[in-house]
Every structure is written in structure tokens, then in C-alpha cells.
């Protein structure tokens, strides 16, 4: 029993050591970052931006599961350069901001694939949560890092434009979300120190 | 006869006249209906139909103006000089409406940032970038042209009826009849 306890203690120490070695750095989002999307309406692409969002980005060198992307998107800030379309997006058939003002994206784990590291993440829009694969490129820069990603969503997975709007001749089902974050110099994450 | 003569309208002009009359009156009705609709897929489809028919009118107007260059215009019947001048003015307003309404609609659509898909078939380019100030201006022009069209249409129809029932001449009949009149 004593040996087992010792072994457990040793393992715990090793684990703590590993955690501190892998302690992710917390980055802050800088101006010049953008969260945009591209959809199709009546045979034509259009794009829009989510101008207001909060992102917590924690990343360690090995993109271990201690890393985290946690983004809250304030949907009222959606701007697609068309007042009528933006008003429609706010309505009950689409984002329904009266009941669901925010969309939420949170990684649940990171893994390596032949194409590079990807995150698995839960994306919640309206009252629908779907686990998605999130391929990204994280690059360190002299002042911090950049995070770039493009992910294609099917709007119907999130109940966006259900019912009559499900018809894709007016509004296409596929929506590409483009992430470009400029991140400031990392600071060690106090929670893991 | 395909072409018009000194006394009668050719079949091409009569077909253009009546197809455009139906389209333009239909477009007025669609336009007033669609703006009053609550947001729905049907509203968007009604707008899409209005735009597609508007592009059709623009195309027919160009054909009509070109065709008019190739033929003579029948002589006006039993009306005084001022009435002929008024009729010409009204017809000029109608021709202007055929071109200004589709173009201002296209301009408005572009400035508002909407696509312009013709019968779900192909897309026309945006005339300008999305711009709220230009959108208001284009909208004012489109709506202004609508009221010019309504006024001109009323005068045009009134003139046709006056010729038919008061002057009892062939002005109206020769625009509908296939056979030789007068």
C-alpha cells in the first residue's frame, strides 16, 4: 500500500511538472483581428463581419489539451453591408438575438492530423450546439502570434433559416467563417503556474 | 405587316406595346405589393420577380427604341396641335420611364447591397458599391419615376379613350387590330 501511495505521489509530481512545462500562454486579441463570414444569396457571395466578440486564447507549444480557444460572439454586431439583410439576420428565423444574443465557440481538445493540428470544438448558435473540427494555423510573431482559420458550416445544423428559409435558392446552406486574430505577446497563465 | 406604315402599326410594335404595357402595370402592382409585405421568403421571391421583370422591360425598351428607328411612325389622327404635343410629351415620359425605372432600380439594388439575379438564371453586376447615401438617392429617383410613370400612363390611357369614344377615330383600334383599319 505504501509503495502504491509513493508511486501515486510520484506520478502526481510528474504530472504537475508536465503541466507546468506545458503551461499555456494566454494571448489577448489585438485590433486588426477579424471574425467574418461568407454566405451565398441569390447566386452571389456576400460577406459580413462580427464586429464585437470576446476571445480567450491559451496556447502552449505542443498545442496540448491545456490549450483553449473560447470565443463569445455578440451577434448584434453583425454587419453584412446591407441594412435589410442585417435586420433579417437579427430576426427570429435567423440568429434570434432577442433570445440568443451570443454565439459561443469553445475547444474541447486538440489533436494532430496529417494536415496539421486541429481542435475539436463545440459551437453553439441559437439553442443548437454542434461539435466541429477546427483546423487552424497558429504562428508566433515577434510581438505575439496570429491565429488563422476557415471553417465551413451548414447553417441548417444551427437552425439558421429553418422553415421556409431552408430553401437554398435564396440563401445557400454553406457558410464559411473566417478567423484572423492578431494576438499580443503572451503572458504566463497564472492558473497553471 | 412587321413594320408600321403611314396609317397602321406593324405587328412588332404592337407586340412590344402590349407586352410592355402588361409588364409595366404588373411591375407597378408587384412593387407596391412587395414593399408592404412582412419579411418572408415570399417577399424576397416577389422582389426577385420584380427585378427580373424590370430587367426584361429594360431589354424590351432597348429593342423597342432600336426598332422604332427602322420604321416610320403612323400619322396622328384627329387631334389639335396642342393635343398632339401633349401626346408626344406623354409618350416621351413613357419611354423615359421604360429606361429610368429599370436603371434606377438596378442602381438602388446595387447601392443597397443586394444581388441581382435574373429569373434565378444569371447575375448582373453591381453598378456601385453598397452605400447608404447613394441608396437613398437611388430610391428617391426610382419612386419619383414611378409617379411620373403613373401620371403618364393615366394620360396615355385617357388619350386613347378620348380618341376612341369622343373622336371615334382609329387611334386605339389600330394598336390592337391585326386587320387593316381606317
Image (tube, coloured by chain):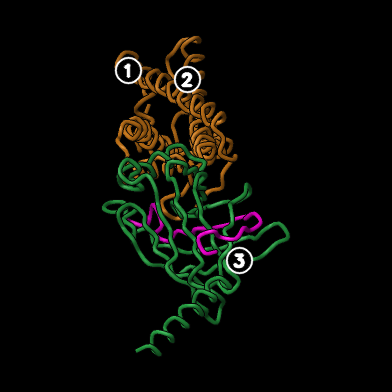
Chain colours: A green, B orange
Chain letter of the residue beneath label 2 in the structure image:
B
Whole-angstrom CA distance, mark 2 to mark 3, is 67 Å
Q: Secondary structure at mark 3?
A: strand
The C terminus of chain B - image quarter: top left
> Quick one: B125 or A89, which is closer to the camera?
A89
Judging by the rendered image, the residue that carries numbered circle 3 is A138
Q: Specify few, some or many for label 3: CA neighbours under 10 Å numbering under 14, 14-19, or 20 or more.
A: some
Judging by the rendered image, the residue that carries numbered circle 1 is B168
Chain letter of the residue beneath label 1 in the structure image:
B
Give coordinates of residue B172: x percent, y percent: 36, 25
State the image quarter where residue A127 is shown.
Answer: bottom left
Residue B90 is tagged as: 2
Q: Is residue A171 magenta?
A: yes
First in sequence: mark 1 vs mark 2: 2
Cβ atoms under marks 3 and 1 closer than 8 Å? no
Give coordinates of residue B128: x percent, y percent: 60, 39
Q: Where B45 sits versus A137, above or below?
A: above
State the image quarter where residue A158 is shown.
Answer: bottom left
Residue A101 is tagged as: none
At 42% from the left edge and 35% from the top edge, which residue is drawn?
A: B17
Give coordinates of residue A180: x percent, y percent: 59, 57
Q: Specify few, some or many for label 1: CA neighbours under 10 Å numbering under 14, 14-19, or 20 or more.
A: few
Q: Is residue A45 visible?
A: no
Residue bounds of the magenta highlight: A167-193
Q: Residue furthest left?
A: A163
Q: Specify few, some or many for label 2: CA neighbours under 10 Å numbering under 14, 14-19, or 20 or more.
A: many
Whole-angstrom CA distance, mark 1 to mark 2, is 21 Å
Q: Is residue B152 magenta?
A: no
Q: Where A101 sits versus B140, above or below?
A: below
Q: Where B156 sits versus B67, above or below?
A: above
Give coordinates of residue B91: x percent, y percent: 48, 23
Amino acid at each position: 500500500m505504501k509503495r502504491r501511495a509513493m508511486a501515486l505521489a510520484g506520478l502526481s509530481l510528474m504530472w504537475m511538472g508536465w503541466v507546468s512545462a506545458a503551461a499555456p500562454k494566454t494571448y489577448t486579441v489585438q485590433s486588426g483581428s477579424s471574425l467574418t463570414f461568407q454566405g451565398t444569396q441569390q447566386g452571389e457571395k456576400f460577406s459580413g463581419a462580427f464586429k464585437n466578440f470576446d476571445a480567450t486564447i491559451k496556447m502552449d507549444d505542443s498545442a496540448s489539451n491545456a490549450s483553449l480557444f473560447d470565443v463569445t460572439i455578440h451577434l448584434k454586431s453583425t454587419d453584412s453591408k446591407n441594412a435589410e439583410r442585417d435586420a433579417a439576420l437579427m430576426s427570429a428565423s435567423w440568429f434570434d438575438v432577442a433570445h440568443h444574443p451570443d454565439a459561443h465557440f469553445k475547444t474541447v481538445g486538440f489533436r494532430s492530423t496529417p494536415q496539421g493540428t486541429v481542435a475539436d470544438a463545440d459551437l453553439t448558435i441559437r439553442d443548437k450546439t454542434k461539435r466541429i473540427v477546427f483546423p487552424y494555423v497558429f504562428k508566433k510573431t515577434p510581438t505575439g502570434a496570429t491565429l488563422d482559420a476557415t471553417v465551413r458550416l451548414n447553417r441548417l445544423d444551427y437552425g439558421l433559416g429553418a422553415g421556409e428559409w431552408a430553401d437554398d435558392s435564396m440563401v445557400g446552406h454553406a457558410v464559411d467563417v473566417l478567423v484572423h486574430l492578431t494576438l499580443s505577446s503572451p503572458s504566463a497563465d497564472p492558473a497553471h503556474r | 405587316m412587321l413594320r408600321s406604315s403611314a396609317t397602321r402599326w406593324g405587328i412588332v410594335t404592337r407586340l412590344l406595346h402590349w407586352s410592355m404595357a402588361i409588364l409595366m402595370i404588373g411591375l407597378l402592382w408587384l412593387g407596391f405589393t412587395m414593399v408592404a409585405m412582412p419579411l418572408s421568403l415570399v417577399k424576397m421571391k416577389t422582389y426577385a420577380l420584380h427585378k427580373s421583370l424590370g430587367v426584361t422591360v429594360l431589354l424590351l425598351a432597348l429593342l423597342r427604341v432600336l426598332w422604332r428607328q427602322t420604321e416610320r411612325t403612323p400619322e396622328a389622327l384627329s387631334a389639335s396641335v396642342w393635343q398632339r404635343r401633349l401626346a408626344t410629351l406623354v409618350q416621351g415620359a413613357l419611354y423615359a420611364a421604360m429606361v429610368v425605372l429599370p436603371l434606377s432600380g438596378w442602381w438602388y439594388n446595387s447601392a443597397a447591397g443586394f444581388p441581382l439575379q435574373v429569373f434565378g438564371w444569371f447575375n448582373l453586376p453591381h453598378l456601385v458599391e453598397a452605400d447608404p447615401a447613394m441608396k437613398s438617392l437611388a430610391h428617391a429617383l426610382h419612386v419619383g419615376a414611378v409617379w411620373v410613370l403613373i401620371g403618364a400612363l393615366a394620360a396615355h390611357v385617357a388619350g386613347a379613350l378620348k380618341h376612341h369614344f369622343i373622336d371615334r377615330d382609329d387611334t386605339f383600334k389600330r394598336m390592337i387590330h391585326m386587320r387593316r383599319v381606317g
